[in-house]
Image (cartoon, grey):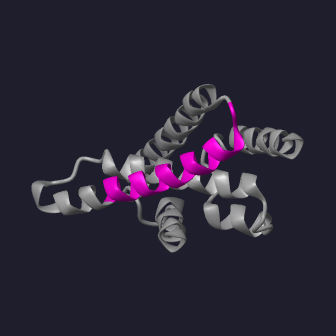
Amino acid sequence: MRVFKLSLALLIILSVKSHSENMLPLKKYLKNNQDFKDLSRTIYLLKRCTALHYFLSDNKFTTKDNNVRIRYVKDYNFFSIKLYKILSLENSDFSKLNKKVDNEILKFSKTYLRDSKKNLQKTGSSFKRNYILDDLKICSKIQ
Protein backbone atom coordinates (compact mmCIF):
# COMPACT_ATOMS: atom_id res chain seq x y z
CA MET A 1 0.00 0.00 0.00
CA ARG A 2 2.87 2.34 0.82
CA VAL A 3 4.44 1.71 -2.59
CA PHE A 4 1.12 2.54 -4.23
CA LYS A 5 0.86 5.83 -2.33
CA LEU A 6 4.40 6.78 -3.35
CA SER A 7 3.65 5.83 -6.95
CA LEU A 8 0.46 7.88 -6.87
CA ALA A 9 2.36 10.88 -5.48
CA LEU A 10 4.90 10.55 -8.29
CA LEU A 11 2.09 10.30 -10.80
CA ILE A 12 0.51 13.49 -9.48
CA ILE A 13 3.82 15.31 -9.78
CA LEU A 14 4.22 14.09 -13.35
CA SER A 15 0.63 15.06 -14.14
CA VAL A 16 1.14 18.60 -12.90
CA LYS A 17 4.31 18.99 -14.95
CA SER A 18 2.59 17.69 -18.07
CA HIS A 19 -0.12 20.37 -17.98
CA SER A 20 2.25 23.04 -19.20
CA GLU A 21 1.92 24.75 -22.59
CA ASN A 22 2.06 21.38 -24.35
CA MET A 23 1.95 17.98 -22.77
CA LEU A 24 5.05 15.88 -22.94
CA PRO A 25 4.57 13.64 -25.97
CA LEU A 26 3.98 10.05 -24.95
CA LYS A 27 6.98 9.01 -27.01
CA LYS A 28 9.27 11.12 -24.80
CA TYR A 29 7.46 10.02 -21.65
CA LEU A 30 8.01 6.36 -22.54
CA LYS A 31 11.65 7.01 -23.38
CA ASN A 32 12.16 8.59 -19.95
CA ASN A 33 10.10 5.95 -18.11
CA GLN A 34 11.15 2.54 -19.36
CA ASP A 35 10.22 0.48 -16.29
CA PHE A 36 7.40 -1.68 -17.66
CA LYS A 37 6.55 -2.96 -14.18
CA ASP A 38 5.93 0.54 -12.80
CA LEU A 39 2.21 0.77 -12.12
CA SER A 40 2.21 4.58 -12.10
CA ARG A 41 3.59 4.49 -15.67
CA THR A 42 0.74 2.23 -16.76
CA ILE A 43 -1.85 4.40 -15.03
CA TYR A 44 -0.43 7.56 -16.61
CA LEU A 45 -0.50 6.00 -20.09
CA LEU A 46 -4.08 4.84 -19.64
CA LYS A 47 -5.12 8.30 -18.44
CA ARG A 48 -3.51 9.94 -21.44
CA CYS A 49 -5.01 7.46 -23.90
CA THR A 50 -8.43 7.76 -22.27
CA ALA A 51 -8.22 11.56 -22.46
CA LEU A 52 -7.01 11.50 -26.06
CA HIS A 53 -9.87 9.29 -27.21
CA TYR A 54 -12.36 11.33 -25.20
CA PHE A 55 -11.07 14.46 -26.95
CA LEU A 56 -11.24 12.78 -30.37
CA SER A 57 -14.72 11.37 -29.80
CA ASP A 58 -15.96 14.84 -28.88
CA ASN A 59 -14.67 16.37 -32.13
CA LYS A 60 -17.17 17.66 -34.64
CA PHE A 61 -17.11 15.09 -37.42
CA THR A 62 -19.19 15.26 -40.55
CA THR A 63 -21.96 12.71 -40.98
CA LYS A 64 -19.68 10.86 -43.39
CA ASP A 65 -17.04 10.49 -40.67
CA ASN A 66 -19.44 9.37 -37.95
CA ASN A 67 -17.89 5.88 -38.02
CA VAL A 68 -14.57 7.43 -37.04
CA ARG A 69 -16.20 9.13 -34.05
CA ILE A 70 -17.87 5.86 -33.05
CA ARG A 71 -14.49 4.13 -33.16
CA TYR A 72 -12.97 6.78 -30.88
CA VAL A 73 -15.87 6.35 -28.44
CA LYS A 74 -15.23 2.59 -28.36
CA ASP A 75 -11.51 3.18 -27.79
CA TYR A 76 -12.30 5.69 -25.03
CA ASN A 77 -14.45 3.04 -23.33
CA PHE A 78 -11.71 0.43 -23.73
CA PHE A 79 -9.04 2.60 -22.09
CA SER A 80 -11.28 3.89 -19.32
CA ILE A 81 -12.39 0.37 -18.37
CA LYS A 82 -8.75 -0.79 -18.20
CA LEU A 83 -7.81 2.24 -16.12
CA TYR A 84 -10.62 1.90 -13.62
CA LYS A 85 -10.06 -1.84 -13.23
CA ILE A 86 -6.46 -1.20 -12.21
CA LEU A 87 -7.41 1.65 -9.91
CA SER A 88 -10.23 -0.24 -8.21
CA LEU A 89 -7.86 -3.08 -7.36
CA GLU A 90 -5.34 -0.70 -5.84
CA ASN A 91 -7.51 1.66 -3.85
CA SER A 92 -10.15 1.10 -1.20
CA ASP A 93 -11.67 4.61 -1.42
CA PHE A 94 -12.63 4.35 -5.06
CA SER A 95 -15.29 7.09 -5.08
CA LYS A 96 -12.80 9.85 -4.19
CA LEU A 97 -10.24 8.45 -6.59
CA ASN A 98 -12.84 8.15 -9.35
CA LYS A 99 -13.66 11.86 -9.20
CA LYS A 100 -9.98 12.82 -9.09
CA VAL A 101 -9.12 10.63 -12.08
CA ASP A 102 -12.09 11.95 -14.04
CA ASN A 103 -10.86 15.50 -13.41
CA GLU A 104 -7.33 14.58 -14.55
CA ILE A 105 -8.68 12.99 -17.72
CA LEU A 106 -10.74 16.11 -18.46
CA LYS A 107 -7.66 18.31 -17.93
CA PHE A 108 -5.63 16.18 -20.32
CA SER A 109 -8.47 16.26 -22.84
CA LYS A 110 -8.74 20.05 -22.60
CA THR A 111 -5.00 20.31 -23.14
CA TYR A 112 -5.30 18.19 -26.28
CA LEU A 113 -8.12 20.46 -27.45
CA ARG A 114 -6.17 23.64 -26.73
CA ASP A 115 -3.04 22.32 -28.43
CA SER A 116 -5.00 21.17 -31.49
CA LYS A 117 -6.55 24.64 -31.82
CA LYS A 118 -3.13 26.30 -31.54
CA ASN A 119 -1.77 23.93 -34.16
CA LEU A 120 -4.73 24.67 -36.44
CA GLN A 121 -3.94 28.39 -36.27
CA LYS A 122 -0.23 27.81 -36.95
CA THR A 123 -0.38 25.11 -39.63
CA GLY A 124 -3.96 24.98 -40.90
CA SER A 125 -4.37 21.48 -39.45
CA SER A 126 -5.30 20.39 -35.96
CA PHE A 127 -3.07 17.33 -36.03
CA LYS A 128 -0.32 17.57 -38.65
CA ARG A 129 3.17 18.13 -37.23
CA ASN A 130 1.74 17.80 -33.74
CA TYR A 131 2.40 15.38 -30.90
CA ILE A 132 -1.29 14.39 -30.82
CA LEU A 133 -1.00 12.05 -33.83
CA ASP A 134 2.09 10.43 -32.33
CA ASP A 135 0.21 9.93 -29.05
CA LEU A 136 -2.63 8.32 -30.99
CA LYS A 137 -0.19 5.91 -32.65
CA ILE A 138 1.20 4.91 -29.25
CA CYS A 139 -2.28 4.42 -27.80
CA SER A 140 -3.19 2.27 -30.81
CA LYS A 141 -0.21 0.02 -30.07
CA ILE A 142 -1.33 -0.39 -26.46
CA GLN A 143 -4.63 -1.89 -27.54
* Residue 125 seen in this snapshot: no
The number of numbered discs placed on residues in the rendered structure image is 0
Would you place residue 31 above or below residue 70 in this image? below
Q: Foreground: 73 or 106?
A: 73
Highlighted magenta segment, given as a residue range:
72-92
* Quadrant in which the N terminus appears: top right
The overriding secondary structure of the stretch rendered in magenta is: helix
Q: Foreground: 91 or 136?
A: 91
Residue 82 coordinates in the image, percent (x, y): 53, 55
Residue 33 coordinates in the image, percent (x, y): 78, 63
Tell me the residue at 43%/50% (across/down). Answer: 116
* Residue 101 seen in this snapshot: yes
Tell me the residue at 57%/54% (across/down). Answer: 46
Residue 115 part of the magenta-drawn span: no
Tell me the residue at 67%/58% (across/down). Answer: 42
Residue sitting at the far top: 96
Q: Is residue 17 left or right of residue 53?
A: right
Residue sitting at the far bottom: 141
Tell me the residue at 25%/57% (across/down). Answer: 70
Residue 71 coordinates in the image, percent (x, y): 29, 61
Residue sitting at the far left: 63
Residue 73 part of the magenta-drawn span: yes
Quadrant of res 78:
bottom left
Would you place residue 133 above or below residue 3 in this image? below
